[in-house]
Image: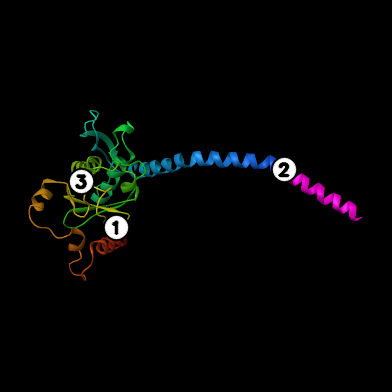
Amino acid sequence: MNTRWVAMVLGGLFGAVIIAGLYFPILKERVKQTAKIQPQSEEQARRELTQSLTANPTEARVKAKLFWASNAHDGSLAPVNIDLPLASEPALRAKQVLNTLLAGPADPELRTLPPDAVLLAFYILPDGTGIADFSEAMASSIPSGIESEQRAVDSLTRTLAANIPQVVRLKILIHGQEVETLAGHLDLTGSFVVSARGAQAATAPQPDPLSSSLSDAPPLTPVSASRQTYAATREQQ
């Protein structure tokens, strides 16, 4: 009886080894295929999000002007007119336009912003300062250098100027935080002029746009102010 039981156990173990030998290569191949597909799936999901923000049939189509890199490849920007269904509300309209800018032009070589960067939030303070909160990829994936960083910001400000007259200055946050530079060079501690009205205001000393909107509140650091302003705006939305 004991000999028969041992034979049955050994037979079962032998069969399990054979099955494992056949299954593991198949499992390994599936894991490799999934790894190849995952980045494309994430990119597609981001593009679908962009399309959902801009493709609302109830909104009037407007000829928006977006600024990507020029075909001359000399570091300059060139306007591209695109028909988009845009909302009338300025902050939402800005989100739609900037998400289209992030999606990129037909020629990927003319991109000005990282393809994996995401606009997390956009809102406009009473003084006309637009607050654009981007994912960390905006800073980590952009080529480090003053020219590429300045071109990215110019792309944002010129696109906003052409489509959202309510925005006079732009403040850039990275994942809800004020950071010192974009990718090691361009200063992000201040704000960037968007319109002529913003340029005139910039000639006089300006309080920090994030803390000035909280003048009735206790003193806060710029980062804390940005969090409170963002939270209050999200609650209103």
Magenta: main secondary structure: helix
The image quadrant of residue 126 is: bottom left
Quadrant (top left/top right/bottom left/bottom right) for the N terminus = bottom right
CA gap, disc 3 and disc 2: 63 Å
Residue 5 place in picture, x, y as percent: 87, 53
When the figure is inspected, residue 53 is found, relative to residue 81, above or below; the finding is below
In this view, the residue farthest toward the bottom is 218
Residue at the (27%, 35%) spot, across then down = 82
| Disc nearer the start of the sequence (3/2) | 2
Residue 118 place in picture, x, y as percent: 34, 47
Residue at the (12%, 58%) spot, across then down = 206
| Image mark for residue 177 | 1
Return the residue nearer the eye: 120 or 56.
Answer: 120
Residue 43 place in picture, x, y as percent: 41, 41
Amino acid residing under circle 2: Ile
| Image mark for residue 99 | none
Please identify, in this view, whether the residue under mark 1 or under mark 3 is nearer the observer.
1
Q: What residue is shown with label 3?
A: 164
Q: Residues within 10 Å of mark 3 (few under 14, many from 20)?
A: many
Quadrant (top left/top right/bottom left/bottom right) for the C terminus = bottom left
Amino acid residing under circle 1: Gln
| Disc nearer the start of the sequence (2/1) | 2
**Label 1 element class:** loop
| Disc nearer the start of the sequence (1/3) | 3
Q: Residues within 10 Å of mark 1 (few under 14, many from 20)?
A: some
The magenta span reads 1-19
| Image mark for residue 19 | 2
Q: How many marks?
A: 3
